[in-house]
């Protein structure tokens, strides 16, 4: 039976959420990624510097996912101690360690000079680029949605479809909030929020989410958008 695109996304998101719930190291990497992403807002990174930081952070998470998959596969194959099984696990763990060291060095090189002159980068040096804030806002909404689903998942529906908070609603309302800050046209703002409401309504009509889950998603998206565009900038 062929998998649909939505099924592929669902399996992928389920793997990420389950790894966060079951693997302590993955949870640590996940939290650190959010902290680093937020910290990037307070420093005047160029586009290339931000991409390097994002790549280094993502690489650690990817390597941890691969390491977890290898460990689970070995545990499934054999329950007894075997020197080769231990070697494979150690090699996979070594790959995670190298990626973590790489991320630390990248973070050190990017943040050190700016932290060294902290007096010059306090609130007036906060990154205020609308493109940067928009990109970070959407990433944070996705990360927070995954984290909330991982924390409160109770086996109803799937990780990609369903859950305590609607990711589609969160993203759509975050986009609408960003448009509200960037646009001076009340018609554009109204139409954008109307589209966000239609996205939420479609999740309810499709019986993927309840009304409360869509509302929670909308609130999450609006709060993230307001925090980054109003308080930070």
Image: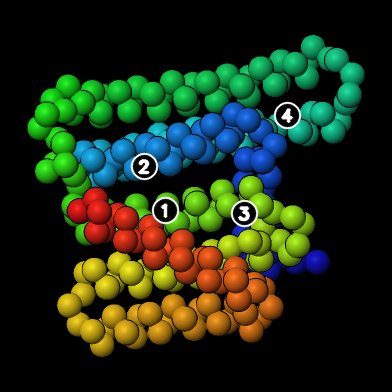
Which residue in the structure is indicated by mark 1? Answer: 139
Q: In front: mark 2 or mark 4?
A: 2
Q: Residue at x 57, y 82 (%)?
A: 202
Q: CA distance from mark 3 to mark 2?
A: 20 Å
**Residue placed under numbered mark 2 in the picture:** 37
Give residue 121's mark.
none
In-image side of 155 versus 29 (left or right):
right
Query: Based on the displayed image, in which of its 4 quarters is residue 63 positioned?
Result: top right
Residue 13, visible in the rendered structure: no
Task: State the residue position of label 3.
Answer: 149
Query: In front: 192, or 68?
Result: 192
Task: Tell me which residue sits at (38%, 57%) in the image.
Answer: 224
The answer to whether mark 3 and mark 2 are in CB contact below 8 A is: no
Q: Quadrant of residue 74?
A: top right
Q: Earlier in the sequence, mark 4 or mark 1?
A: 4
Determine whether label 4 and label 3 are within 8 Å by CB. Answer: no
In the shown orientation, is residue 107 left or right of residue 204? Answer: left
**Residue 146, percent across and down?**
56, 52
Q: Describe residue 5's horizontal placement relative to residue 53 as left or right.
A: right
Label 1 and label 2: CA atoms lie apart by: 9 Å
Considering only vertical position in the picture, is 24 above or below 40?
A: above
Labelled pair 4, 1 in contact (Cβ < 8 Å) = no
Q: Position of residue 138 (x, y in %)?
A: 40, 58
Instruction: Determine whether 182 is above or below 118 in the image.
Output: below
Q: Are marks 1 and 2 in contact (CB under 8 Å)?
A: yes
């Amino acid at each position: 039976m062929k998998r649909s695109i939505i099924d592929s996304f669902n399996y992928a998101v389920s793997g990420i959420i389950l790894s966060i719930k079951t693997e302590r190291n993955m949870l640590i990497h996940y939290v650190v990624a959010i902290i680093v992403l937020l910290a990037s807002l307070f420093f005047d990174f160029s586009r290339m510097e931000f991409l390097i930081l994002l790549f280094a952070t993502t690489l650690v998470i990817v390597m941890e996912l691969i390491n977890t998959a290898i460990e689970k596969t070995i545990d499934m194959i054999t329950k007894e101690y075997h020197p080769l099984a231990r070697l494979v696990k150690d090699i996979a763990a070594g790959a995670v360690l190298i990626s973590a060291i790489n991320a630390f060095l990248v973070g050190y090189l990017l943040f050190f000079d700016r932290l060294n002159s902290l007096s010059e980068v306090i609130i007036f040096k906060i990154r205020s680029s609308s493109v940067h804030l928009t990109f970070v806002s959407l990433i944070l909404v996705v990360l927070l949605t995954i984290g909330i689903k991982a924390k409160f998942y109770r086996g109803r529906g799937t990780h990609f479809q369903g859950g305590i908070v609607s990711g589609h609603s969160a993203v759509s309302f975050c986009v609408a909030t960003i448009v509200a800050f960037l646009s001076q046209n009340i018609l554009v703002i109204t139409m954008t929020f109307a589209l966000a409401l239609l996205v939420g309504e479609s999740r309810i009509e499709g019986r993927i989410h309840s009304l409360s889950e869509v509302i929670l998603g909308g609130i999450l998206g609006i709060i993230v958008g307001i925090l980054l565009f109003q308080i930070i900038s």
